[in-house]
Amino acid sequence: MIELYAHTLATMNPLWFIAIGCSLYIIDWMYTNTDLLMIVGFAVVLQAFPNLLGFPEIMQAWLTPIFLLIAFFMQGWISQKLKSSTLLPFETHQTYVGMHGTIASVDFKNESTEYFSNFDSLMELRDRKQKETHFIKKVVLDNGESYPLKETCRYLSEELKVTVIGFDGIEMNVQESKNVK
């Protein structure tokens, strides 16, 4: 059985190994995203080199598990090089941890009563709601960006210097800065 496998490997064109390996990687990247087919695909591409160099049949057959082990141990490095390095939205927030900023209040007028073509004015029996003004506390970072303050941090006073310690969704979790100049 191993002789048949070795003979098949030795008689294949090395370009077929490269084509099959690249196809496995593309299938893994587009459909499964598990890195399993990438490992096998990389091992198949490695198998093309002994075939290209004309190694004996039995040696090519026994190099297959060695190439699988090499591909397995190199999968992290290969994935890092071949896949996108774009950060996901929750990962971009982690870059703000440790930054300093100031707490600011922003007045927010509720203008939703006039949004749908002043619908309430057409209804005579309905009481018109007054526009309400809400104050929202935000953190204005030193680089100018601002984010809403987490509900548990709303007790902090305005113009207070703070340090970002984390995110909860889009709300910023902060603590009072100890020694910010």
Image (spheres, grey):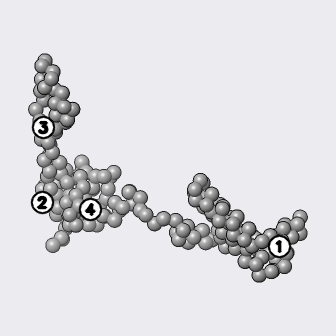
* Mark 3 closeness class: few <14, some 14–19, many ≥20 residues within 10 Å: few
Determine if residue 166 is in view: yes
Residue at the (13%, 47%) spot, across then down: 107
Front position in the image: 164 or 56: 56
Secondary structure at badge 4 equals strand
Is residue 130 shown left or right of residue 6? left
Please name the residue that numbered disc 2 is placed on.
Answer: 159
In the rendered image, which quarter contains the C terminus? bottom left
For marks 1 and 2, give the CA distance: 75 Å
Is residue 136 shown left or right of residue 50? left
Callout count: 4
Q: Amino acid at mark 2?
A: Glu
Residue at the (19%, 60%) spot, across then down: 140
For marks 3 and 2, give the CA distance: 24 Å
Please name the residue that numbered disc 1 is placed on.
Answer: 10
Q: Is residue 134 above or below residue 116?
A: below
Residue at the (23%, 52%) spot, across then down: 148
Please name the residue that numbered disc 4 is placed on.
Answer: 164
Please name the residue that numbered disc 3 is placed on.
Answer: 132
Residue at the (56%, 72%) spot, across then down: 77
